[in-house]
Amino acid sequence: MLDLNYIRNNKEEILAGLDKRNFEAPQLLDDIIALDQQRRSQQTELDALLAQANTLAKEIGSLFKTGQAEKAAPLKEQSTALKSQTKTLQEALQKTNAELLELRTRIPNVPHTSVVKGNSEEDNEVVAQHGNIPKLGENALPHWELAAKYHLIDFELGNKITGAGFPVYKGKGARLQRALIQFFLDENTAAGYQEMQVPHVVNAASGFGTGQLPDKEGQMYHITGDDLYLIPTAEVPLTNIYRDTLMQEHELPVALTGYTPCFRREAGSYGAHVRGLNRLHQFDKVEIVRIEKPENGIKALDEMVAHVQQLLSKLELPYRILRLCGGDLGFTAALTYDFEVYSTAQERWLEISSVSVFNTFQAERLQLRYKTKSGEKIVPYTLNGSALALPRILAGLLENFQTPQGIEIPKALHPYTGFTHIEL
C-alpha cells in the first residue's frame, strides 16, 4: 500500500510508474488526495474540540474544588455539547479513514525504474541464461510419463483422494521430494537465513498484510467456518511474524526461510500446458524472506537472486533469469526477477522461482516500522523469493537427467536421497 505522504507529494511520478503496468489511476489518486485532505481537516477539528473539552474539564473541576458549583453548571452544558460534537466528528473521521483505506488498497505498487512497460509475459526481459540444454534421444519422455514409468508420482490416485492437481508422491519420488526440501533448507540456513516452521493457515489480517487479500483473482482456499485461509506461499506467515511491530534498528536485517505446502486454486488453468507437475493446487515450496532498511533493498534483492542462481547451478539445471515487465508484475511487487528451468522433453521454459522487492508497500499494510537510534520511525523494505518451488524443479530433474538406463540424480542431492539414480 502506498504511503499517503508519497501519494500527496508525488502524483505525477506515481502515474508514470503505473502507466508501465497499464494501470490508469488519475481519478483514483485525485479521490485519495481529496479524502486525505478531508481526513486531515477532520482530525484538526477533532483535536481542537478535544483540547477545548480538556480545558473545560479542568475549569469545572477547579470550580467544584473551590465551592463554586453554581458557576460550573453552564460549563457542564458546554462540555455535554462538546462531547456530542466530538462523537459525531469521531464517527465521521472513522468513516473517512475506512473509505481512504479501501481506495488505497486498489492501487498496485509503483514499479522500479528498471522495469519496462509491457502487456504480458511476452514483454519480459531475459537478463541472463546459464547452463547447457541437454540433447535427449528420440524416445525422451515428459515428466508425467517418466513419473508413471518409474512409479514416482500417481496423479490418478491424487485425483481419487482429492481431485485434479493433488498428486501422490511414492517411493523414490517421495524421497526425492524430501531430499530437495532438506537440500534447499540447508543451503538457505548456510547462507544466513533463520529456519522457521509456520502455520499453513492464516487469518484475514495476515492475508491483507502481504497483499493476498482482497483476493481479486479468487486464488486462495477459504475455510469459511473459521474465516481462515490456506496459505498460497510461506511468504504470508513468515512476513506476518512482524505485522503490527515496531522493531529496533539493530534488529535489521531480518532473513528467514521456511518450508510449507502451498495451496492455490489456480482458477481458469486448463490445457496441456498445465499437465503433470506444471501447475498444481497443492505443492511444496521453500521460501526466503528478508526485511531490510530502504537503502539496502536493491542490494538485498541482488543477493537473493545470486543465492537462487547457486541453488540451480548445484542442481546442474539449465536456467534463465527474466526481469518482469510492468504488465506481468505482481500487484504488490516493485521489481521481480523470475527464474525458469528449461524442460527438455516439453521444449519450453518453466517458471520455478520469483524473487521480488516490495519496497515499503507490504510494510505499510503490515503496519511494520523500525525505530532508529535517533528515535525516528522508518518503514522498512520487504523482499521474498522461492528457494525453491519443487514441482517444476522435479519436472526439470526428471526430464533433463533421463537416460536410456533410467534417471540420474544430481551429485548435490546424493547425500539427501541415499541413491544416485532411479531405474526400473
Image: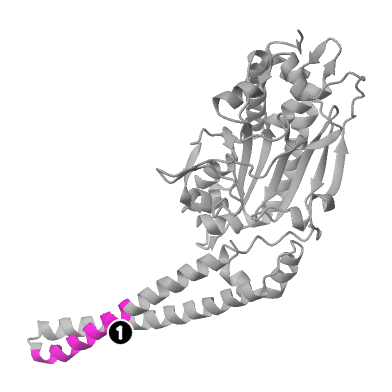
Q: Residue at x 49, y 49 (%)?
A: 206
Q: How many marks?
A: 1
Quadrant of the rendered image containing residue 308: top right
Closer to the camera in the image, 47 or 229: 229
Q: Residue at x 52, y 77 (%)?
A: 35
Residue labelled with disc 1: 52
Closer to the camera in the image, 255 or 346: 346
Q: Residue at x 74, y 59 (%)?
A: 112
Q: Secondary structure at mark 1?
A: helix
Quarter holding the C terminus is top right
Q: Is residue 399 left or right of residue 39?
A: right
65 to 28, vertically: above or below: below
Q: Residue furthest top?
A: 424
Q: Is residue 77 left or right of residue 227?
A: left
Pinpoint residue 66: horizontal percent, then vertical percent: 9, 85
Categorize mark 1 by other alpha carbons within 10 Å: few (<14), some (14-19), many (20+): some
* Residue type marked 1: Gln
Closer to the camera in the image, 150 or 96: 150
Quarter holding the N terminus is bottom right
Q: Is residue 185 left or right of residue 21?
A: left
Please tell me whether residue 78 belongs to the stretch shown in magenta: yes
Q: Does the image show residue 372?
A: no
Q: Residue at x 16, y 81 (%)?
A: 61
Pinpoint residue 9: horizontal percent, then vertical percent: 64, 75
Q: Residue furthest left?
A: 67
Point out the stretch of residues depicted in magenta. Answer: 70-87
Please tell me whether residue 75 belongs to the stretch shown in magenta: yes
Chosen colour scheme? one colour
